[in-house]
Structure formats: C-alpha cells, structure tokens
Image (cartoon, helix red, strand yellow):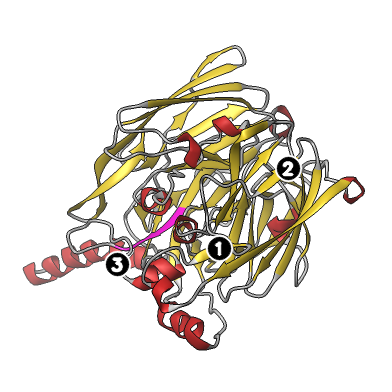
Amino acid sequence: MINRRQFVQLILTLAILPKQLLQAKGFLSPNSFHVPPLELGKRLGKDVFFDLDIRSGMSMILPNKATPTLGINQNFLGVTLLANKGDRVHIKVKNNIHKTATLHWHGMKLPAKADGGPHQSISPKHTWLSEFDIIQDAATLWYHSHQMHETGSQVYHGLAGMFIISDDESKKLNLPDEYGVDDFPVIIQDKQFNRNGSFAYLSSMMDSMRGMKGNTILVNGVINPVLKAKKSLVRLRLLNGSNARTYQLSFNDNRAFSIIASDGGLLEKPVKANTIRLAAAERVEILVDVSDGAYPILRHTAIQESSGMGMMGMMRGMGNNDKNMNIFQIDASSALKSASSIPQILSKHDNPQQSEVTRQRKLVLQMQMEPRMMFGGDAFSINGKTMDINRIDEVVKAGSTEIWHLENASMMPHPLHIHNVQFKIIARKGGIKGHELGFKDVVLVHPQERVSVIMKFPEFRDAKTPYMYHCHILEHEDRGMMGQFVVV
C-alpha cells in the first residue's frame, strides 16, 4: 500500500515522464509537419487545367497570434502543382488581393508570354491565363510572385509554392514517390515577426542591403515541425524559399544522405553527402535512410562571411546575423520498411556541347555603396545597369548554345537565376560537386568569383516579350540587380 503523498508523487511523475522522454529524444516541438495540398488539376487527355486564386488571409503561425498572410488557394503559401512531361497545362490565375501581382513558373522552359515575370502582371480582380507544354524531364520546380519592385514583399508574405514535374522514366526507378507518405515538399523560409504576430519586413536599411533575413525558420509555413516518417526511406524535395538566406544543411547526428536531383531534375547518379549548401531559390532532392528508427534533426549551421574593407565590410559586420538554427525533425520510431531503393544510375544527361557554342557573354554583378544609394534608390546592378523594364539588355537566338560568365564584383554572394533555361556549370573556383553536377537555373556566385555556365536555349521565339536574369536575393532584384533578354 502507498499513502496519499506517495500516490500524488506517482501521478506527478507519470505526468512529467512523457515530456522527459520527448526531451531525451530531442523533439523540437509538438508541431506536426504540414504537407501542402496536392493539386492535380482537371485532366482532359494531355490537357490539364489549373485554377489558382491569389488571396490574403490570417494564419496561426505563432501561438495565440494571427499573422496576416498571402497564399495561393489557401491562406499561406501555395498548393503543390503536379503535371507530367508531355502535358499541355492551362493555368488560370485570379488576383484577389488589393495589389498587382504575378506568378512566375520558376525553372520552367516555356514561351515568354507564359513565364509570369513582371511583364505578365495581374491587376486586382483580374485573371491571367498561362498556357504551355511541359517539355522537360521530372524535376522539382516552384512558382512565386515576380511583381516589379514588389517581389520581395509578396514572396515573403506567402506568394510561393512548389511545382513538381513527373515523367515515365523517373517512375521506373523505384524512388519514393508517394506524395505526403514518403515523398515530401520542404519549403524552407526564415521570417521576422512583430510583437502583434505580423511579419516584420524591411525594418532597417540592413534588411534592404543584405536581403531580408529572419530569426524564425518555417517549413511549409510551420515552426519546428516534426515529420512522422511512415517509410524507412524518405525523399525530401528541399526548396530554399527564403528571400536572401543561404543554408548549410546537415543532420544533427551527421547521417549521410543521397543527393538525387538538383534544380533541373535528376542527377546522372546519386551523390553521397552529409551536408549541402542551398542558396535562395535553389532546389535539391535527397533520400534519407531512417531505418534506424531515430529522431534526426535537419539543421542549418551558421555561415560566416569573410570580412571586407571600408563601408561594405562595416555593413557586413553589422548585418551578418547568421546563427545555427533547427529546420525540422524526423520521427522514424514507427517507420515501416520501404519497398523503394536508391538506384545506382538515375538518368542520362543531354549536355550542351562547347563545340556548339555560338556566343559567350559576361554578366558582372555589382553593388553601389555610396551612402545616398544605401538609403534609397537602386543600389544593385548588372554590367553597370540597373533594371529598366523598357530596355532589352541581351538578344539570344532560339536553339543556340551559349556560355555565360558570371562575375561577382561585390563583397556579397549573389545567387544568379536565368529564366527559360537549365544550364550546366562548367567552371568555378573549388570545382563542381554535389547538386551542382546537375542541371541548374540558379547558381551562387561568391564575392570576387567567376562562374561559367553553358546552356542551350529552347525553340521559343518572341522579339517583343523578354525573359529575366537576376539575383535571387529578392531585395537585390527589386532594387535593380536584374536584366532582360529576348529570344529571336
């Protein structure tokens, strides 16, 4: 028999025990991993029809506080679009917010008028129809606002989602491909919050100059989520959906994973790694074996920028607020053995040939650091020119192969994105490895570095409607680090 006091102590111990067990296993939080709804559209043969609604709403991201957000077909962020190679997609986008917006299909090869850049803006209460054939292989792409001078703010508040392309060849590989079961979108973003729960955007001059960074990580709109793994082999489609931050990702137990795809689709063969660097707008697909039933945490390790001289060095010293941050956790305690596997060969790339190159171009990324530029105006440029929507900067021939040399003349890294193409990196300091072995549409160019990429332009011709190339630190894009090219 136990007395009353012992009984009370036993009840208290039992109440505390589950929490202690969770802490021992390293749980981040009770927040569940959110899988965005999968949108397959309405199919009529090879024609697929999507209806998208840009809207505003309120989202419970912080405890007991509502955050004003933007989203596509939901209150915050977008639904996941899925289509197949060979489909003809018809995407009707209605703008139900009070500001003009766009939706750009990032990484897609398509006609310029369907691209969703700043030339395809959608006024409030108006609708835009984007129609194109999907001509590229299976890949993890995404879509987001690309409104002139408003891209940073609109993406930050939620106008972004994932766009997955599937194809017959990838389905034969026995990869995890059951959406929300063993195949997961992972949209990583960092946010800053005001006391009332609203997003804090561009609260200081540093936010504008270095790009907007926050101290709170969201995954698919959730803080510190826990993914309850159902299968022992998990496919993670990682998207750096942040405005500016570059992530250095690894698991807290240093477990290895297999990199299987980059921006433009599958690599030729898997690459084993235990860490990966992901700049803004880059995507990478990894396979993680959790058959040990453990509780690994994906985390970001702080990236220390080298010091510079003068005003730029002072700015970076003031603005480098990087720190170690947890991204999300996997709970594999009840994962069942997966029937999927990691193939030795994934695909065969049809690489652009240097012998077919007809033109080489140079893009020099620059920052003007005079005080008057820091506090207002366009402080960022490419080849000495800030973005002018009425000026065509480059003219490219359809079907041609070119090499572009990307030079960073500033003291900050810049992730450079080129619309309408998937390129291969052919030269960079330190060599080419990991996901950079695959096809890319974004590449991080470090300070005082030169990166060379080769690409073959699709057979889309439009002498009047341009595509963009720009830094994907969105605040840099909004303030001038963007140019335009037409394909003729």
**Quarter residue 275 falls in:** bottom right
Who is closer to the viewer here, 101 or 261?
Answer: 101
**Quarter residue 206 falls in:** bottom left
- The residue carrying pointer 3 sits among few (fewer than 14), some (14 to 19) or many (20 or more) residues within 10 Å by Cα, namely few
Asked whether the viewer can see residue 176, the reply is no
- Which residue matches tag 1? 381
Measured in 3D between alpha carbons, the distance from the residue under mark 3 to the one under mark 1, in whole angstroms, is 23 Å
At 55% from the left edge and 51% from the top edge, which residue is drawn? 238
Asked whether the viewer can see residue 456, the reply is yes
Which quarter of the rendered picture does the N terminus lie within? bottom left
Measured in 3D between alpha carbons, the distance from the residue under mark 1 to the one under mark 2, in whole angstroms, is 21 Å
Who is closer to the viewer here, 80 or 421?
Answer: 421
Q: Dot 1 lies on which element?
A: strand
Residue 271's x, y, as percent?
Answer: 73, 57
Q: Dot 3 lies on which element?
A: loop
Residue at the right extreme, as displayed: 355
Q: Which mark is residue 203?
A: 3
Q: Which residues are magenta?
A: 188-192
Q: Amino acid at mark 1?
A: Ser
Dominant SS of magenta comes to: strand
Q: Earlier in the sequence, mark 2 or mark 3?
A: 3
Residue at the left extreme, as displayed: 4
Is residue 272 a member of the stretch shown in magenta? no
- Which residue matches tag 2? 396
Q: Amino acid at mark 2?
A: Val
Q: Earlier in the sequence, mark 1 or mark 2?
A: 1
Q: Amino acid at mark 3?
A: Ser
